[in-house]
Amino acid sequence: MKFASEFRDPKAAKGLLAEIARVAGQIGATREKPVHIMEICGGHTHSIFRYGLDKLIHEGVEFIHGPGCPVCVLPRARVDECIQIAEKPGVIFTTFGDAMRVPGTKKSLLQAKADGADIRMVYSPLDALELARRNPTREVVFFGLGFETTTPSTALAIQQAAREGLTNFSVFCNHITVPEPIKALLDDPHMCLDGFIGPGHVSMVIGIHPYDFIARDYGKPLVVAGFEPTDLLQSVLMVLTQVAEGRAEIENQYARVVPEHGNKVSLAAIADVYERRPSFEWRGLGEIDASGLRIRPHYAAFDAEEKFGVGYAGMRTEVEEVEGCACGAVMTGRMKPVQCPQFGKGCTPEMPLGALMVSSEGACAAYWQYGGARAAAE
Amino acid sequence: MCLGIPGQIVAITDEARLMAMAQVSGVRREVNVACVAEGPLEGLIGQWALIHVGFAMSLIDEDEAAKTLETLRDLGEAQETLEQMAAGDAALAGE
Ligand code: SF4
């Protein structure tokens, strides 16, 4: 085991790998006919590559890297809309650093900043709120991005802004939800997934019951997992065991952080501030029903879409994906990053073409960072 | 961006706004504790929490905090988060 020294608990990892091999053998999983397990969360994707789990694990287990990186699924049209807002006079546009390099149709936020727009990287929506307090004559817009882990933070920031009566703070809401794209993947007739590794920190907010339909309606197991290597291995083993026993249940490997019913305060804030959009566009996956959130009418004063008449509140422009870019196929597990004609050629972390190359949680960037040389040599 | 980072709550800074000072990997950062506040805020002092984009999202024990931080360091995410905190401070300074 080549990477064993990198595990803090190599003995446990070794034991888990042996147990996985045993159950995989019992199911009859082989390199030709593998069990397909999708890890939904980009943090898990990163961890799998960092520790080389995809290489260490029995060859009958194949990881499919899911759509769980909010930066990676952000459509080009939304990046364009950010820039449209950021370039308005008087606006201070604030964003998580991760989003700076995502390519839009003409440019990224980073390029727009170089062109003179006042775009600032912040760590928290609370930084944006503070900017609004300190700059009463400017309009401070926060680029709200992320899954359920991040959604409570913008909801609480908006509630705080409302309490203080701030009139120069708004959020460009791009929050998305995890269960809906899983449903879309499961409804895809080309789908070949046998089970899921569920996101840890998202589930810390929403609990484990929003996934119930996956077991109940689709007969697939899901195990909510932590992101340490032994967490991931144990979760894979739990999925395989369910498959071997013909069960499909939602299990929680990460109970030390994930409460069954989620976080009450977070869920209440989300419910107060946000409602579901009828549908929302995902890069590479298209429009998915009820997969995005928007700000409720009674907080409309804090909704940048309403304030500036852009996005779903204005004229939306359909934007085609870049030609030759296989992000959609990679995200649905139909293609490996290295099979994309652009991988390492038109598309590298320095000059990303698709969003999966931008974030360290994107499958293509992870492949490049940890396996680029390996893949090129194969 | 999607992973929380462990931090230890060391002081309550603004009772009304539910703000506290946390020590994150040697750096002090003000965080919101609304999601973990049950009972008097003083009770949070000394506790460890997973902190995500400036919000304490879940209380964890010290052992879990140490293990999580190790993994985040391996992934390069710990450094990234600290850089983002610094970027936030720079943004407030007008950069
Ligand atoms: S290599 Fe680039 S273009 Fe191809 S799938 Fe990955 S991110 Fe998309």
Image: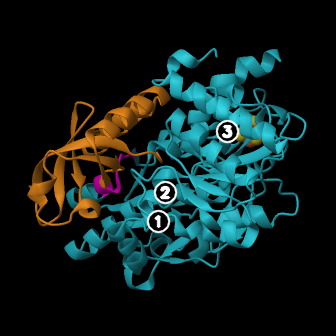
Do the residues bearing badges 1 and 2 touch, measured as CB atoms within 8 Å?
A: yes
Q: Amino acid at mark 3?
A: Ala
Residue placed furthest toward the right: A32
The residues colored magenta run: A121-128
The verdict on a common chain for dots 3 and 2 is yes
- Marked residue chain, label 2: A
Quadrant occupied by the C terminus of chain A: top right
- Residue placed under numbered mark 1 in the picture: A206
Q: Residue B43 appears at what percent x and percent y?
A: 12, 56
The verdict on a common chain for dots 1 and 2 is yes
**First reached walking from the N terminus: tag 3 or tag 1:** 1
Instruction: Identify the residue at horizontal 71%, vertical 26% (top origin).
Output: A55
Residues A182 and A215: in front is: A215
- Residue placed under numbered mark 2 in the picture: A202
* Chain A pictured colour: cyan
Q: Residue A292 appears at what percent x and percent y?
A: 58, 69
- Residue placed under numbered mark 3 in the picture: A363
Instruction: Identify the residue at horizontal 68%, vertical 48% (top origin).
Output: A241
Which element is circle 1 on?
helix
Mark 3, mark 1: which one is toward the viewer? 1
**First reached walking from the N terminus: tag 3 or tag 2:** 2
* Chain B pictured colour: orange
Q: Is residue A75 left or right of residue A329?
A: left
